[in-house]
Image (cartoon, rainbow, N blue to C red):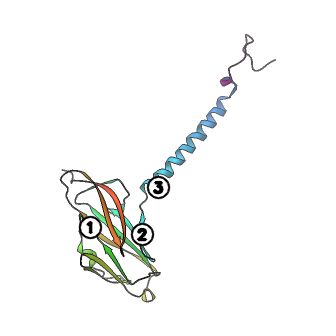
Amino acid sequence: MNHHTLEGGGQLPHEALESPKSKSRFSRFIASMVAAVLSLAGLVAVAPGAYAAPAGITISTLHNGSPVSDGAVVEAGDIFTLRVLYDNNLESQTIVVGPPEGLTFDESSLDVSGNDAIESINLVDGNIHLNFIDPAEWDVNQGVWDLDFTIQEVELPESRTIEWTVDGEPSSIDVIVINESA
């Protein structure tokens, strides 16, 4: 008896030769692969960047305390943070941050009381100078300090590049700024 024929003797179409179980496995495999690729793409799209800085320093960006990436929608009045992560491999004991334009610096970020690694933070000619104690004298191996800024009002929603420098090296992130919700 020929298993690949219809009762009337004709040949079965090619699609009928594949079992529904193998089609199901293949479909699940393809769906799993697509889901994995989309998951990885999503992680890359929302992962906050670390920006150019001297050895021992890493800068990341936050919006209202959460990681922010290119294309994010932010509201005027929100907090934009340059998070300075430092470790005891500092090349220099003073790091100069050129603050972003269109944002208002929160001067409470200058108060370093209780920090064992940062001696002082000062505004000098419009730049922010982070002065570190010699890493050999630290009680810690690494630390973090937030420089907070308030996003200024805009007339209409606008795409804006927030740009800053660290020891003269520029970095930026593109955001869309809208006015505060009514």
Q: Which amino acid does label 2 sit on?
A: Ala
Point out the tag, 2 or 1, that comes first from the N-terminus: 2
Horizontal arrangement in the rendering, residue 33 relative to residue 97 (left or right): right
Point out the tag, 2 or 3, that comes first from the N-terminus: 3
Horizontal arrangement in the rendering, residue 23 relative to residue 69 (left or right): right
Instruction: Please tell me how crowded label 1 is: few (under 14), some (14-19), or many (20+) other residues with Cα within 10 Å.
Output: many
Q: Where is residue 69, by image quadrant?
A: bottom left
Residue 157 spot, x, y in % from top left: 23, 51
Disc 2 to disc 1: CB gap under 8 Å:
no
Distance between the alpha carbons at the discs numbered 1 and 3: 25 Å
Residue 145 spot, x, y in % from top left: 35, 74
- Say which element carries label 2: loop
Q: What stretch is highlighted in magenta?
A: 6-15
Residue 96 vs 151, above or below: the answer is: below
Q: Does the magenta stretch include residue 112?
A: no
Q: Name the residue under label 3.
A: 44
Residue 110 spot, x, y in % from top left: 27, 78
Residue 93 vs 60, above or below: the answer is: below
Q: Where is residue 75, by image quadrant?
A: bottom left
Q: Which residue lies furthest to the right in this view?
A: 1
Distance between the alpha carbons at the discs numbered 2 and 1: 19 Å
Q: Quadrant of the N terminus?
A: top right
Which of label 2 and label 3 is nearer to you? 2
Instruction: Please tell me how crowded label 2 is: few (under 14), some (14-19), or many (20+) other residues with Cα within 10 Å.
Output: some
Q: Name the residue under label 2.
A: 52
Q: Name the residue under label 1.
A: 149
Magenta portion: prevailing SS class = loop
Q: Residue at x 23, y 58 (%)?
A: 76
Residue 69 vs 30, above or below: the answer is: below
Q: Is residue 7 magenta?
A: yes
